[in-house]
Image (tube, rainbow, N blue to C red):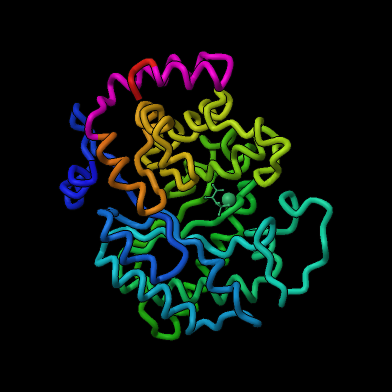
Amino acid sequence: QVEEWRKLRDEPTVTVDGVHVELAANIGTPNDVAGVLDNGGEGVGLYRTEFLYMGRDKLPSEDVQYNAYKTVLEKMEGKPVVVRTLDIGGDKELPYLDLPKEMNPFLGFRAVRLCLDRQDIFRTQLRALLRASVHGNLKIMFPMIATLGEFREAKAVLLEEKEKLVKEGIEVADNIQLGIMVEIPSTAVLADQFAKEVDFFSIGTNDLIQYTMAADRMNERVSYLYQPYNPSILRLIKMVIDASHREGKWTGMCGEMAGDTTAIPLLLGLGLDEFSMSATSILPARSQLTKLSQAEMKELAAKALDMQTAEQVVELVRSIGQ
Ligand code: PEP
Ligand code: MG
């Protein structure tokens, strides 16, 4: 099997009926890029920038960030790199920010909420990203977007920083796609409206599942409710993908579900354009996808959407030998 996977390393991911999907990787540091290329990643679908901020005693400077982003973009040699702006809070803490303890950190002051409040932090990161943009194929995405207002505000800040840099005579790429993570149900439900304003969506199922099912992703006592294959989750995913396609945009997925063998046939059938996963999952996923027909998986997904329970969906996928 490993032999077969190796052969697929430099191949595109094309289904039996000729549909191309992109297999990208999730990374946390520039050191992870080697593994992405080694495993045949066609891009970086999620660069979690939190690690730049963690494990140190103060905020990383603009230059420290610029160098990290530039390194990743250069090493990826023109392949797409989706960088997520700071997603701190929830399970990821930053001691030096000295934020007050919250009753419900997962529902609290985190990610883009914090960035729109602490614009000093946000603007520094955006400047570093914009400066790095000339070194490769950069796409930027905002995490934990719950409202159109948040997206517009964050985008406005980005455009302001871009304008400032241009005025300073610093070169910035002018084709940077701007997207959002869809990991809050309100955003999935209004995807048709978001799709008119963003360049792409990336579905963050790790959080989308916990918020939809109201089941803490870290709490084992409610882990039985953490159900990726629940038809409600599949319907939300469908809404997002369909909304993006109606506007000529694309949708990726960067939650764990994107690399899950049982989910992959369904996601292909729902029309997902980009699957972003841990690097070591890429070749097995490519092997699986190249044996599937999207037309057939569309029928499978349609059946799954009409089922009542996650167990029934799993049974359905198993019944086709997946
Ligand atoms: C997600 O929520 O699915 C996601 C990819 O982000 P994180 O796991 O970093 O919260
Ligand atoms: Mg998340």
Place of residue 266 in the rendered image (x, y in percent of width and height, measured from the top left): 40, 27
Q: Looking at the image, which is closer to me, 153 or 297?
A: 297
Residue at the image position 67 percent from the left and 57 percent from the top: 91
216 drawn magenta: no
Total count of labels: 0
Left or right of residue 33, residue 203 in this image: right
Q: Is residue 297 one of those drawn in magenta?
A: yes
Left or right: 119 with respect to 19?
right
Query: What segment is highlighted magenta in the picture?
Result: 290-318
Depth order, front residue of 206/171: 206
Residue 82: x and y in percent read 41, 58
Residue 7 drawn at (x, y percent): 15, 47
Predominant secondary structure, magenta span: helix
Q: On the rendered image, what quadrant is the C terminus found in?
A: top left
Q: Position of residue 25 (x, y in %)?
A: 37, 54
Is the residue 66 above or below the residue 101 in the image? below
